[in-house]
Amino acid sequence: EPEVTQTPSHQVTQMGQEVILRCVPISNHLYFYWYRQILGQKVEFLVSFYNNEISEKSEIFDDQFSVERPDGSNFTLKIRSTKLEDSAMYFCASSRGQGEYQPQHFGDGTRLSIL
Amino acid sequence: AQSVTQLGSHVSVSEGALVLLRCNYSSSVPPYLFWYVQYPNQGLQLLLKYTSAATLVKGINGFEAEFKKSETSFHLTKPSAHMSDAAEYFCAVLNNAGNMLTFGGGTRLMVKP
């Protein structure tokens, strides 16, 4: 069964550094998402992306964050000037379409640790 | 804004016992609801979804959930727990635009032998 794959599984970065989290969505999916889960807290929506544009974003997704689909297969989340509070598990998801009949499929996540 | 609340951050059952994980929603319009499961060191896997076609929804691994509008609930059940069901379970609601999931706090299910 096709899967969403995320790399790396664990990223350790010094505070203030930039980090790029990578995702390969399922190949025939057109909608892409990032979520995060701070340890012990809820899974939180960050952003959705379609047709090379952000279609929805949360308050968390400020100027520090950006997303990109640099080629036909990857979907990346960039965090500039990381802060301690950015430490979390980041999940990428993709779906073929939008709505209740096109569920989002999640990757295994990247654990980001900011030192 | 739509939201979901999961009562009980931890639930412990014996193997073979009934599993009941609670989820209540808040929505001004008919919601689209999902249950996801997260096994250790893995991502979120879709268990089942409610799309208004039927109030009783069957999912994978023997789980099912019933949508009750009068109670604003979408509780997840399984008649007989198995050790492999030990995981964290998340209830989620989809926004009207269909592009954002809002998750509950999660319930960690423990299964005792």
Image (cartoon, grey):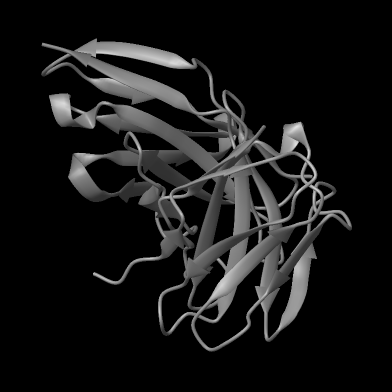
Classify A58 as above or below B65. Answer: below
Q: Which residue occupies the extreme right position in the image?
A: A63
Question: Can residue B31 be seen in this snapshot?
Answer: no
Residue sitting at x 37%, y 14%: B11
Q: Residue B96 is drawn in which quadrant? A: bottom right
Residue sitting at x 32%, y 29%: B87
| Residue A47: percent from left, percent from top | 71, 60
Question: Can residue B86 be seen in this snapshot?
Answer: yes
Q: Nearer the viewer, residue A34 or B17?
A: A34
Q: Residue B27 is drawn in which quadrant? A: top right
Q: Nearer the viewer, residue B5 or A83?
A: A83
| Residue A8: percent from left, percent from top | 46, 55
Quadrant for the C terminus of chain A in the image: top right
Residue sitting at x 41%, y 33%: B89
* Count of numbered labels shown in the rendering: 0
Quadrant for the N terminus of chain A in the image: bottom left
Determine whether, in the image, residue A93 is placed left or right of residue B89: right
Classify B45 as above or below A69. Answer: above
| Residue A91: percent from left, percent from top | 53, 52
| Residue B16: percent from left, percent from top | 11, 19
Determine whether, in the image, residue A9 is placed left or right of residue B40: right
Q: Nearer the viewer, residue B81 or A43?
A: A43
Q: Residue A99 is drawn in which quadrant? A: bottom right
Determine whether, in the image, residue A29 is placed left or right of residue A68: left
Residue sitting at x 42%, y 85%: A28
Q: Nearer the viewer, residue A108 or B85?
A: A108
